[in-house]
Every structure is written in structure tokens, then in C-alpha cells.
Amino acid sequence: MSASTESKVVSVDPSRLRLTDGEGTTGVFLGMRCRDCGIYVFGAALFCQSCSSGDLESVELSGRGILYSYTIVRVPPAGWPGPVPYVLGEVELPEGPHVLAEVTDIPEADLKIGLAVAMALQKVQDGQSETARMVYKWRPIPQFTGVGQEETR
Amino acid sequence: MTQFKPVRDVVVVGVGLHPFGRFPGKDLATLAREAVVAALQDGGVWWRDIPVAYFGHVYYQGMSVGETALGALGLTGIPIINVENACSSGSTAFWQAYWGITAGVYDLALAFGAEKVPGGPVTVTAADSPERYIGGDHMMAGYALRMRRYMEETGAPAAALAQVAVKARQNALLNPYAHRKQTYTVEDVLASRPIADPLTLYQCCPTSEGSAAAVLCAREALGRYGLDPSRAISVVAATLTSGNYNGRGSDHSAFSPYRTEPAGRAAYEMSGLGPEDIDLLQVHDAATIGELQQIEALDLAPRGEAWQATLEGRTALTGDLPVNTDGGLLAMGHPFGATGIRMVHETVTQLRGEAGPRQVPKARVGMAQCSGAGDVTTVHILAR
Ligand SMILES: [Zn+2]
């Protein structure tokens, strides 16, 4: 594969993740905030998913959160380009939305509801497409404040 | 939620089922047709009297399979509507049939569903969706996320979840139509192959092939079509809701499974009945955790306590609230398009007193709840 093809990197889902540097190694979560009721949604929305208002603003969402639930997927869905098994984490952002993604760099024994995690981008090239995708993952972080309580590990 | 008012009483006059399992020699239309013929025979209904048909199915097996299936009976020019609403496609077809009759558009309606589900993990999104790279689109992983939350918040032990599967197999043993006909113990369930921790293989429903059908009629029209009122079972509630995420995205919480709460409450309101009136229950147990959460969401057990009711045997055939009396999705199997109507079939069979060795004594009111991707929930209440 040529160098020019290798450098072609896109966000796995531009409505949810904006890449913020030329190499695509850093990024920010995108969402919407309802100006009427104040709730946030992850990704795009035309109307508020809580009060149906059309008065929404585009916002950047926090790239950190706490592990709300997790599972170790041992039989992956068809086409999964990553390792098997993999840890699937459901993470609650400080703004409220839940974001599902693989949790990387964590021994199984350390997995625990309430764990502090941060977004980490990983380049995924699966052979079916010459475009590499930057995919958001979760990675444990030592400390995080922001969901009403302080957590330390 | 807006709920239209029924105008005419609607009854189920006939039900039919094709066994659930694997049938490599039969195409979808043939599978579907066998249940239809069984339902027509069961109700003593002439095919030529059927003015509309709704067909639930999900996986693509060619266009207009509903028309192909019914073509062999002789196409009579009636509207035939192919319905896709994920795992609740069949119950959505039934819901449409109900509302068509109560509103006065039709006197009779056929609701049927069939499926040949491919093997392997079930996903919701298209193959080129970003979800394929993110890894979050995996039906059983979603249930596993709910299950971990539920266990964390309620203290439910793994054995209580496993007991749901054990009970399902015991009920299926009394059901000649079931996909799975071998019982096992709590230990077997927990030791089976892990799929998505803490879910093990025996806590996930098999993907199946099969079909189910029901014929509905306006009660006031029974005489006109020469139908027997003595075996007719009333449909006293029919509700359907779809997703509302409240901005949280994929929220796999312990206490708000899909849209069951609003659909259930609307069904109680529509029927004038309450949880205390329900004699038997069919719920969407695609995974063991599903059964517990649905029981609670339908106000048939206090929040966080359905697992205790399960361990105490209260949801078994001999308990005070028998749940998934035919084996449920876990043991009966889960051909998506057929499942919701299979639940109606079991409820009607029980309320008629025709369930043989798995008969629930003195059953007068039965509820059937079916979930589907897109946070779809249907709830039907049937009464004798
Ligand atoms: Zn709002």
C-alpha cells in the first residue's frame, strides 16, 4: 500500500467524532444540547430526544467518563476487525449521554463499574477498505472528577 | 403517549404454529403457509373470507414473501402487508390486525409471521455502519451490559439468572413445538460457553426457523362468518411503542428495559385491568436478564425483585405468575417474525384450557410482551 493511501485517515463516524489534528490522532466527541430542556445527546439530532424541541446547538462533549457497565465479548459480531475477546464498555459522560466503545489497556481483573476512563483513538484498517478509520476507544485513567463525586484509583 | 380508543370488541378465533427449529428443506413461504393453514383450520375460517393479511418477517428472503406464502392458497386480491419491526415484527402484524378490525375497516384479519434466522451473533445496523468498527452493535452484548447493571444494583446472584433458563427448558419439555427439548441444571447453564460475560450460551435464545399465525375477528361479526364464539379469546389491550432515549444514547440500565413501561401501562389502562389480574405472562426473554426486567417493567414484581420470585418458583408453571409457559424465546426458539404471534398462540391455547400438560389452572387473563430493536415494545392482553 502506498504512502499516500496510508495517510488517508477518517473519523469512524464524523457525526460523533471530529478529528482535531492533521494525523487524526486526537479528536473530540460531538453532540447536541437542547436550549429548551438542557439535555445533551451524543451525535447528531434534528429534534431534542427528550422534549422534541427543534432549538438545538452543536456542542463538544467531554472525552472522559465513568464505566456504567461492561461485558467481555467472546463471540464477536460479523466483521469485527479487532481482537477477540474484547471488552465493550458503556461509559456515562458528565453531560449524561452513554457512549459504547471498546475498553483497551485494562486487565480483566481491574474491570469495575465506576472506573474512570478517557477517550483514546486507535487507527483501524481492516483490508476491506483502503481508508483507515480512527475509532474511539476507552482507556482507564488514574483519576477523574466530574460526575458529582470524586473517584480515585 | 397517545392511545386511540378501540371501537369494536376483537377476538382471536384461530391460531396456528409450525414447530420452531431448523428446517433446511423448507423455504420461508412454505414455513409461513403451514401456520396459516393451521390457524384457518383451528378457527374454522374460510380463506375466501379473509379480507386483509399482515406478515411479519425480518431477514430478506426475496420480495413480498407474504404474497408468495399466501399465493398457494389462491390469491384473492386482498391487501397483503409485509411488516418489518425487528424482533417484534410478528406482534406488530398482530397489532395492526387488531386495530384494523376494531376501527371497523375489516371484520376479519390474518396476522402471521415466519423467519429463517441465520446463525451467529445478531446485529442491528447495516454491514457498512460505523458500528462495525466501534463494536457496540451486538444484541447479546447489549443484554450482558444490562445484566451486569442489574446484578450490581439488585444483588441478584448468577444462579437466579440461570434459573430463568432452567425454567424455560422445563416448560419447553412439555411443548412439542419447541426448538430446545433438553433440560439442564443451573450448574450446566453457568458452565456453558461464555458469549458476552456474564451471559453464557444457555442464557441466550437460539436463532431459529418457524412460523405462527392468528386469525382475528370482530366479536359482532362472528355469526356472519359462522365462527364458534365458545373458543374465541378477547383481545382487551393492544399497544405498541418505539424508542425514546431521553438523550442518553445506549442506556443499558437495570430498570428501564426498552419501552416496556409505557406500553405496559397503556395496556392496563386500555383493558381496565391491573397487574393483579394477570394469570400468565409471555415476555421477551431473548436473554435470561430480559425476562426479569420485563416482569418488573410490567409492574408484575417490585423493581429488583423478579430474580427472587424466580428462585422461589413463582414464575414456574406451578407458581402464582407463570412466565413463558411454552418455553419462551430461550427454549421455544426465536424466529423473529413469528415470535410475537407465537406468544399469542400460547396465550390463546392456555386461556382456552387446551395447553395439555403445561396448562395453567383457571387462567382467565394472559399478557404477551414482545421487544425489538429500535426500542420497540408491543403489549397485548387477552382474556377468556
Ligand atoms: Zn429538550
Image (cartoon, rainbow, N blue to C red):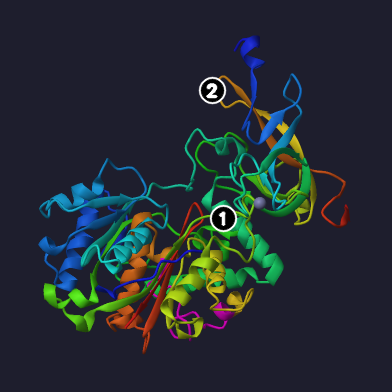
Please give the chain letter of the residue carrying mark 2: A
Within-10-Å neighbours for mark 2: few <14, some 14–19, many 20+ = few
Q: Amino acid at mark 2?
A: Ser
Q: Is residue B325 above or below residue B211?
A: below
| Residue stretch rendered in magenta on the structure | B309-328
The kind of secondary structure element at disc 1 is loop
Residue B82 screen position, x and y as percent: 29, 50
The residue to which callout 2 is attached is A129
- Could you tell whether B296 is left or right of A18 in the image? left
Q: Amino acid at mark 1?
A: Asn
Residue pointed to by mark 1: B244
B175 or B254, which lies in front?
Answer: B254
Q: Is residue B311 within the magenta segment? A: yes
* Coordinates of residue B324 in the picture (x, y in percent): 43, 73
Which residue lies most toward the bottom here? B362
Instruction: Judge from the rendering whether residue A117 lies leftward or rightward of residue B320; answer left or right.
Output: right
